[in-house]
Image (spheres, rainbow, N blue to C red):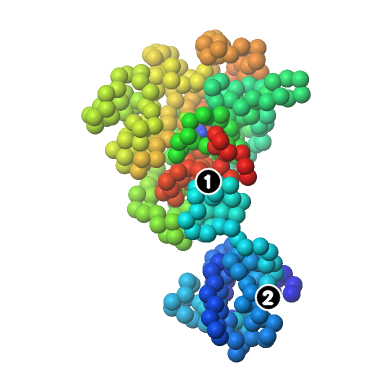
Amino acid sequence: MPESTYKHITDIETSDKEVKVRGWVYRIRKMKDKVFVVLRDATGILQCIGKLEDLSEEAWNNLNEVAIENAIAVKGNAKEDSRAVNNIELVLTDFTIIHKGEVFPIAKDQSKEFMLDNTHLFVRSYKSTNIMKVKANVLRASREWFYDNKFYEVTPPILTGSACEGGSTLFDLKYFDQKAYLSQSVQLYLEALIYSLEKVYAITPSFRAEKMRTKRHINEFWHIEGEEAFVDFEGNMKIQEELVAFIIQYVLENNKKELKELERDTSILEQIKAPFKKISYEEAINTLNENGHKLKWDDDIKTEEERDLSNIIGEPFFVTMYPSAHKPFYVKINERDPKWCYSADLMAPEGFGEIITGGQREDVLDTLVERIIAEGWSPEDYEWYIDLRKYGSVYHSGFGLGAERLTWWLCGLDAIQETQPFPRTRNRIYP
Ligand code: 4AD
Ligand code: MG
């Protein structure tokens, strides 16, 4: 059969006769004179009924032989059925097995380890498919927003000689005779590119050799990063809130089915509009202390505190004016009061916490060099980056949004690992 004669499940109409569909067996129930098959394709699931009286001997035999996850092609007449998903049932007139193969090993009630060893098969699950569809739209909406707002997409390197986010989370590797790292963030390269393109973004994998196992960290994630010339700290937050509000709207509009099937209560998401609330680091500490924490100025807001703060505030919010010592060398220091710097984190509500870190970049050459040294790096390794402050330097800002953090929140999942089809975690590089 030529390719074009097959229909996808969501395109089938009740008036369709002799419609051809192909996919995989999602469920099956065999009876003496009829077989119910639920067929799955990329768009959804379709209930099919094959009756002995309607089918050739060969088709009936195929139907009786077929098993879960076999690849199949079917032909049949659509009919309205209020008990079926999409209200359509297909009454089969033909049934072929494209590939039978072996017994599918994934079943209910298997151990977590078994599931993780079989991620390559588990990605076929309904839940995983729904999450991937949401994530695809997170990426698509980001690109659309950047395009509409005249940002250029660029392709910075992932193999790099200069660390961006501190030495403790670096993956290093041998690069011929030199030492290199996997990118933690392409920010420094984006900063170089604003001098020609002014507004740039990149969507790339970032790597963090985080040793801890948490529900919010993975060792490889997709990073949506923007960088803009002639944009200050405030302007940068405006860009972030507009981008994030756009992505949320896009997903709410285009992933209704997926969010429903994931049992996501979208009421908080539906109310989100830019501009977002802004609180200073100091206000964040005070709010936490009013709610039973015992923090001093300069303490880190750690995972548990971040979760509490996110629950207390109940809407997306920026935490601004962080202590300078908390943030990397590239963040601009407040010249009048150097104890704080121009960095902000965008926090999601409902306990999810940080989804973006962004800020204005240090453009005072001597301060930048001092901060690089203070972090224990050698300025020679950052000569190219320091150069950017020597030739036509301009004020500029940027940010990094974690695609998985955002998808995790939008889908309301238990752990971020579920948003990566093949999550890279401390103990697992297989499959
Ligand atoms: O806060 P981070 O480390 O900031 C940067 O990398 C900046 N250089 C970005 C920039 O200004 N261009 O990382 C940014 C975001 C975090 O807010 C989070 O969403 C995500 O990247 N992220 C992770 N996501 C999943 N697992 C991890 N281990 C992550 N580390 C960071
Ligand atoms: Mg951060």
Q: Relative to residue 29, is residue 266 drawn left or right? A: left
* Whether residue 323 is situated above or below residue 264 in the rendered picture: above
From this viewpoint, which residue is outermost toward the bottom? 53
Amino acid found under the numbered disc labelled 2:
Thr
Number of numbered tags placed on the structure image: 2
Q: Secondary structure at mark 1?
A: helix
**Between residues 426 and 244, which one lies in front from this camera angle?**
426
Q: Quadrant of residue 38?
A: bottom right
Q: Secondary structure at mark 2?
A: strand
The disc label shown at residue 145, or none: none
- Measuring from the top left, give residue 177's x and y in whole percent: 76, 20
From this viewpoint, which residue is outermost toward the right? 176
Pick the quarter of the image with the C terminus. Answer: top right
Q: Relative to residue 243, is residue 58 drawn left or right? A: right
* CA–CA distance in space, label 1 to label 2: 35 Å
The disc label shown at residue 96, or none: 2
**Between residues 291 and 33, which one lies in front from this camera angle?**
33
Residue 78 visible here = no
- Measuring from the top left, give residue 45's x and y in whole percent: 53, 68
Pick the quarter of the image with the N terminus. Answer: bottom right
Picture residue at 39% right of the left edge, 40% below the top: 352
Residue 413 visible here = yes
Q: Quadrant of residue 191?
A: top right
Picture residue at 49% right of the left edge, 50% below the top: 111
Badge 2 crowding class, 10 Å Cα cut-off, few under 14, some 14 to 19, many 20 or more, is some
Amino acid found under the numbered disc labelled 1:
Glu
Q: Quadrant of residue 293?
A: top left
Picture residue at 40% right of the left edge, 54% below the top: 264
The disc label shown at residue 113, or none: 1
Badge 1 crowding class, 10 Å Cα cut-off, few under 14, some 14 to 19, many 20 or more, is few
